[in-house]
Image (spheres, grey):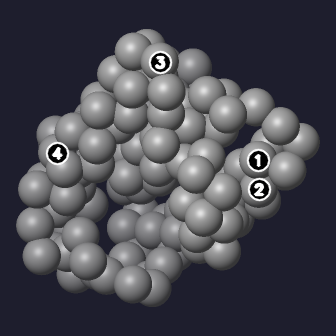
Amino acid sequence: MVGVVVLVFRESLLASGWIAIAVQAVSALLMLWARLTLGSRSFHATADPTEGGLVTNGPYQYLRHPIYAAILYFLWAGILSHPGITNELLGALVTVGLAARMVAEERLMTERYPEYVEYAARVKRIIPFIL
């Protein structure tokens, strides 16, 4: 979170250029879609899985972590619009933090929902069909 706040103060989070702005717009829509799919479960602050079963519909049929993916897409579209070592290091910091959170959540999801193993085997983390 600190990295994102610093990028805001450096005026490097919001993209410039129509392609990067489009990436950020699509990222915002992806996050909204994922949050609507999860409903009230979307605003759970901890990495601990909520009750209600494994969600595999909506954007979750294409990505295991669509909210984190949306954050990363939005973040890097802004950073690449404002290149510089400081911005890139801040982006790397945020990316590592989100990666650690994804791994922790997956470990907890596997414990809570045994079917998560099969789901994880067929659905990519942050880039559909690739990564």
Residue that mark 4 sits on? 33
Instruction: Give the label on residue 131, or none.
Output: none
Q: Earlier in the sequence, mark 2 or mark 4?
A: 4
In this rendering, which labeled residue sits more in front, label 4 or label 3?
A: 3
* Residue 78 in the image, given as x and y percentages of width and height: 56, 37
On the image, numbered disc 1 is attached to which residue? 87
Mark nearer the N terminus (2 vs 3) = 3
Cα–Cα gap, marks 4 and 3: 24 Å
Mark 2 and mark 4 in contact? Answer it, CB < 8 Å: no
User: Identity of the amino acid at label 1?
Assistant: Asn
User: Is disc 1 placed on a helix, strand or loop?
Assistant: helix
Pick the residue in front: 84 or 46: 84
Q: Name the residue under label 2.
A: 90
Judged left or right of residue 75, residue 37 is left
Numbered disc in front, either 4 or 1: 1
Earlier in the chain: of badge 3 and badge 1, it is 3
Q: Position of residue 12 (x, y in %)?
A: 61, 46
Residue 14 sits above or below residue 116 on the image? above
Per the image, the residue denoted by label 3 is 17
User: Circles 2 and 1: CB distance less than 8 Å?
Assistant: yes
Q: Residue at x 66, y 57 (%)?
A: 10
Count of number-bearing discs: 4
Q: Which residue is drawn at 29% across and 32% down?
A: 25
What residue type is disc 3 on? Gly
* Secondary structure type for disc 3: loop
114 lies above or below 81? below
Mark in the foreground, 2 or 4: 2
Q: Earlier in the sequence, mark 4 or mark 3?
A: 3
